Amino acid sequence: MKRVLVVGGGGREHAIIRALLRSPQRPELLAAPGNAGIARDRIPCLDVGPEDVDGIVRAAADEQVDLVVVGPEAPLVGGVADALSDAGIAAFGPTAAAARIEGSKTYAKELMREVGVPTASYMVLRSGKEAEAQLPCASYPAVLKADVLAAGKGVIICENEAAARAAVETFFGERRFGETEVVLEEFLEGEELSLLALCDGERAVPMAPAQDYKRIFDGDEGPNTGGMGSYSPVPGIDREHARALALVAHQPVIDELRRRGTPYHGVLYAGLMMTANGPRVLEYNCRFGDPETQAILPRLRSDLLDLLERSTRPGGLEGVTIEWSPEWAVTIVLASRGYPESSSRGDLIRGLRSIDSIHTELLHAGTAERDGELVTAGGRVLNVTGIGATPGAARESAYAAADQIAFEGKQLRRDIAARAVERT
Ligand code: AMP
Ligand code: GLY
């Protein structure tokens, strides 16, 4: 029997574990560090943090696992896939060299420019002085981005030059994101689309498209979060369209990284803006999206374990088509009070038992056990994914479950997938 270690402890990793539990190969699963919901699924959770690269390698060796599936970006950028491969352990996820595509925005932009992937025009600002000189010539709105991993929070959209000056002050004066270069980029308008593709070093095979909701409040108001909801598929993006987008957004990068001797294995996530002038890549992530994965994987009909293993082998995905359920999935994130600025913890969670487990999948993100009861553990607490024959049905199931769950200060958006319902 195969043994698989999943690294991470959020809703994304819980969704990966649920999909692996559906694999006909019936793998034995482990998580590091996992969470209370993963433990409730009777998956052993190891006391190893997701950023502890040495600890992950040691745990994988001790537990004699056949495959390590890495959820979050930080260990990938930190070289966990390289360290595992040095220890002779298969890892799903790119090497540090390939993961730079998420770790450095300037690297990603240069790569896109080199291979002709359509993206917003940009320039790199290396100091406050350089910014001073450039801001008067920029057109507004403009976008300023710190060149570090900042979980989406390092991006500031500036309506005018005064706002851009204030943003520059947070980057270069206050140094809110530490020592970093800043990307100044053209503001793009359109609808966003998350297109994830499995990559075997040679080819990119797109998964079902998804859309996520980054702002905390309804109508895309308020600060950016890690993500407040998602749905899949996306009206108007059929399999052919997704394939065409992957040829534009993913394949040129895969070809170039292979040519450079740093082939990309794992999942490559392209955040796209569908503008009036065609698709533009806003960013790449070197991992599954959170919360997109919670809406994508429940619809997967192929064996996830087989797909992940194939991705680790050069050319392993040749001839593979990924099968999807025709159903829709809508994921609602339930966040704790104060999120995203702060987050409360230790509040009792009620109502989980009465949830309809046929039409919804309940995933844990920030929960903990306390004296046999489930309590919040900060940030995004729970995710509920509703499944249905139409976006409307999926959405209704998701909100019915979300409304049954109660904890002090619960926050959720009420408009997740409303657009998808309107359009179908
Ligand atoms: P990023 O981390 O680069 O994906 O940026 C986070 C979010 O900021 C994106 O999901 C968009 O909503 C927004 N954003 C980033 N770049 C642009 C851009 N050039 N034009 C408009 N919005 C952007
Ligand atoms: N949902 C956005 C992300 O995973 O980065």
Image (cartoon, grey):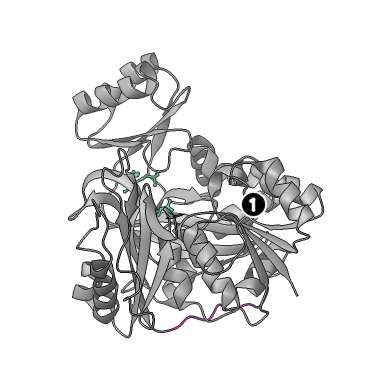
Q: Quadrant of residue 60?
A: bottom right
**410 left or right, relative to 51:** left
Q: Main secondary structure of the magenta part?
A: loop
- Count neighbours of disc 1 (C-alpha within 10 A) and say few if under 14, some if 14 to 19, many if 20 or more: many
* Residue 413 is inside the magenta segment: no
The residue type indicated by label 1 comes to Pro
**403 left or right, relative to 237:** left
| The C terminus, quarter of image | bottom left
Q: Quadrant of residue 353?
A: bottom left
* Residue 321 is inside the magenta segment: yes
Residue corresponding to mark 1: 94
**38 left or right, relative to 416:** right
| The N terminus, quarter of image | bottom right
Q: Secondary structure at mark 1?
A: loop
**398 left or right, relative to 145:** left
Question: Picture coordinates of residue 181 (x, y %)?
Answer: 46, 26
- Residue 144 seen from this side: yes
At a point 31% along the width and 38% down the height, the residue shown is 342
Q: Is residue 246 above or below residue 392?
A: above
Question: Picture coordinates of residue 3 (x, y %)?
Answer: 72, 67
Question: Picture coordinates of residue 422 (x, y %)?
Answer: 18, 74
- Which residues fall within the magenta stretch? 317-325
Q: Is residue 243 above or below residue 382?
A: below
Between 417 and 135, the residue placed more toward the observer is 417
Between 377 and 244, the residue placed more toward the observer is 377
